[in-house]
Image: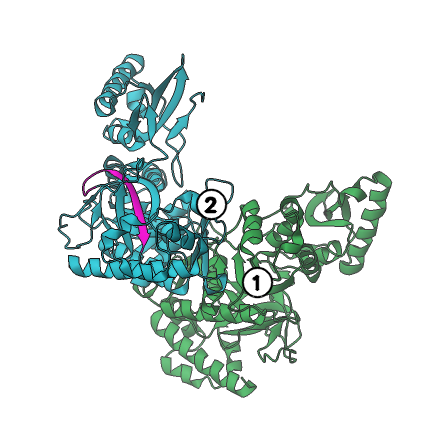
Chain colours: A green, B cyan
Amino acid sequence: MDYLELKTLQTARLKETLRTVFIKNDFYKNKLNEAGIKHISDIDNIKNIDDIKNLPFTAKIDLVNNYPFGIFSRPLKDLIRIHASSGTTGKPIIAGYTKRDIRVWSHLMARVLCAAGLGKNDIGQNAYGYGLFTGGLGFHYGAEALGMTIIPMSTGFTERQFTMMEDIGATALFCTPSYALFLGEEINKFIKDTSKIKLKKGIFGAEPWSNEFRQNIESSLNIDAYDIYGLSELLGPGVAFECVYKNGLHINEDNFLPEIINPKTGEVLKEGEQGELVLTSLNRQAMPLIRFRTKDITSLYKDKCRCGRSFVRMHKIKGRTDDMIILKGVNIFPSQIESIIFGYDYLEPAYLIELYTDNLLDKMNVIIEPKQEVFNMGGSKMDELTKEISHKIYELVGIRSKVTAVPPKTLERSQGKSKRIRDLRKKI
Amino acid sequence: MDYLELKTLQTARLKETLRTVFIKNDFYKNKLNEAGIKHISDIDNIKNIDDIKNLPFTAKIDLVNNYPFGIFSRPLKDLIRIHASSGTTGKPIIAGYTKRDIRVWSHLMARVLCAAGLGKNDIGQNAYGYGLFTGGLGFHYGAEALGMTIIPMSTGFTERQFTMMEDIGATALFCTPSYALFLGEEINKFIKDTSKIKLKKGIFGAEPWSNEFRQNIESSLNIDAYDIYGLSELLGPGVAFECVYKNGLHINEDNFLPEIINPKTGEVLKEGEQGELVLTSLNRQAMPLIRFRTKDITSLYKDKCRCGRSFVRMHKIKGRTDDMIILKGVNIFPSQIESIIFGYDYLEPAYLIELYTDNLLDKMNVIIEPKQEVFNMGGSKMDELTKEISHKIYELVGIRSKVTAVPPKTLERSQGKSKRIRDLRKKI
């Protein structure tokens, strides 16, 4: 699709979406009123997709405040499915889908699988959680749309995951990067001759992960690992995806309009500048969202990919505004620490960032796991090691941190999304 | 469909199925050879669906021995999905599906939902396990085919089940009867005003349950409860189902040919006689099974149902040949004990049958839970109660058993299939 064609399509779809929410959703009607769109005919004044910057943002809290159905633009009877994610309050965040929404989503997920080089003859072992979480069913329907064979494993039952991998001969694995890493750590325990495993590709998402993380998964499972991005508020997985060149994520721009903003001021940033990703639904019936603030930190860039796809790309998510550690006024993302830890062959691929208060000062302790043979070398070796890593962290983020070595397999492994930060700081 | 039409359809589909397995499956080719079908043209000699009695049985052990793909009649590349159930050995039992198989299955499940009086405007809370187990995705696709709204809850997270029930307003619940019973026991803990719950119907299966069990679920959740029957080897749920008259299960005879046999001799029994249910696939591509021995005990009857459906019906499953307790030469099913326990208002809906050896003799101890106010009455009341129940059991099954009262909520509750027997007998 060429640039002008895309912009025309996006503008038309944006206007259609605005008309829908204006007519069918009181929350959005009020928001648009406040932004100066008093009558539906005012929507016709939007000439250019860049005019979106004049529209109001939607935040997660708006979904919480309008729980359960206040954000829907269709009545319950028009829905065929409901998903939910755990919310910031005790109540979940509800996502609704019409029949058409599910079809569109499945199609977008088929694109994702196709871009990773998968096709009809592949067998996908789907270890994303099935159920209310959008990961499992998102991949399931995408694989089905593409005509793959899908094994609906869901999460957990690691031994059975390996049994099926070995006996059915899955060629692709779908799960969170944390679980893929865990499978990579465990594979030799369960499979005698890993050369017989047919796995060649994996698509991993639902949490930010670094390129060093990728290398670890790729070498332990002997596969190509691809990133995928999405969020349940905007359909689920399938917003953006890596192609076989693994060089940034192609955003499905015909369905989602991306912007990068300064998370503090809301100002729209330029191509290449890093900030918070904001997404607008361009093709959704049940629950279109206007300028949804994802809290994810990345940047956009338009240079052509070798694969030929022309949609804008985004860099791997660096972290979430939620996860960003502010220590002594410095912003640090766990992914920065991760890129250091996962770069060392003699460390296990695991870490925990502990924030604590010592003598009124906030400090950071990075807990690492040296491999068994390294750990066995004892005290002075550990001192040397932790000093080196502390120095690397200082070089990268500008903060001096404590680094603590614990025996291998001491830190908790996750079968879903990992928890990387333990915040023990005293709140004043 | 009238009787002759049905028999003609069944015969044609049986012959088509036999041709398929004869050509495409070595295991079946050998089996059919042994049964005298040496050439594919011999299949033409089958004139009548009753000739099926001359064909060999397939047992679960045949699936185990031909693990993983030896029972498939299609190559892996023709499949779009794989399910699995836990096998009797460590390996699972694999079930494969072509695109058409999934379509047929979804259609059959839509029939099931429709027969329970559900339709487009209903919201189904699907608390069957999603993933390899056929329950979750079976109901999911059936609801989708019917145009219902489905909430893919999967099992567990009881508090969230109630949150969604209350906030989304599900009108139908799908799960195992054990989990429905558990939800019924817990509902008052989580929901203040149960009159606001919109639930009106539930479809429960994947384990045998008695009519007394049904009454308990119906009164605690204030719904109509329907039974459904199926097994992963033969698609999954959707082999047979109750209509709104709850008077036996209609078998989807156009897709499954049912027979009742004497489990010891293999002899086919007459209408009304109780024995082991045997099923033959009549409309399956990936994995047709010939005369599969289900191990489930029931009987068939043909008298018309008030709903007008003409397919043969089967009684609620009484138990499995596996679960049948043989004590002093007498056959006892847990469902018989259940029908007594669940008939008492002053007992909690829970029990455990403990088999043990005392002085070289095998004995039975039925553990029950009197309700709190009854339990508080103490020793002599308990003696009276347990004596009465022991007498009832004796009257029904002809065996004198010990009955032991334990405090309420002492026995384990299941969120999936319940375990009703604890066998502590000494094996000689």
Where is residue A381? Give x, y as percent.
Answer: 85, 43
Q: Is residue A141 magenta?
A: no
Q: Nearer the viewer, residue A140 or B126?
A: A140
Q: Quarter of the image containing the N terminus of chain B?
A: bottom left
Numbered mark located on residue B36 in the image: none
Magenta span: B270-281
> How packed is label 2: few (under 14 Cα within 10 Å), some, or many (20 or more)?
some
Q: Amino acid at mark 1?
A: Lys
Q: Which chain is home to disc 2? A: B
Residue ID for mark 1 = A295
Q: Is residue A353 visible?
A: yes
Position of A137 compared to B299: left or right? right
Q: Amino acid at mark 2?
A: Val
Q: Is residue A289 visible?
A: no
Position of B131 compared to A3: left or right? left
Q: Nearer the viewer, residue A195 or A334?
A: A195
**Quadrant of residue B113 within the rendered picture:** bottom left
Where is residue B78? Give x, y as percent.
Answer: 46, 64
Numbered mark located on residue B64 in the image: 2
Using the numbered discs, state the Cα–Cα distance from disc 1 to disc 2 in whole angstroms. Answer: 50 Å
> How packed is label 1: few (under 14 Cα within 10 Å), some, or many (20 or more)?
some
Q: Is residue B276 magenta?
A: yes
Residue drawn at (56%, 65%) of the image: A229
Total number of numbered discs in the rendering: 2
Position of A156 compared to A93: left or right? right
Question: Which marked residue is nearer to the observer: mark 1 or mark 2?
Answer: 2
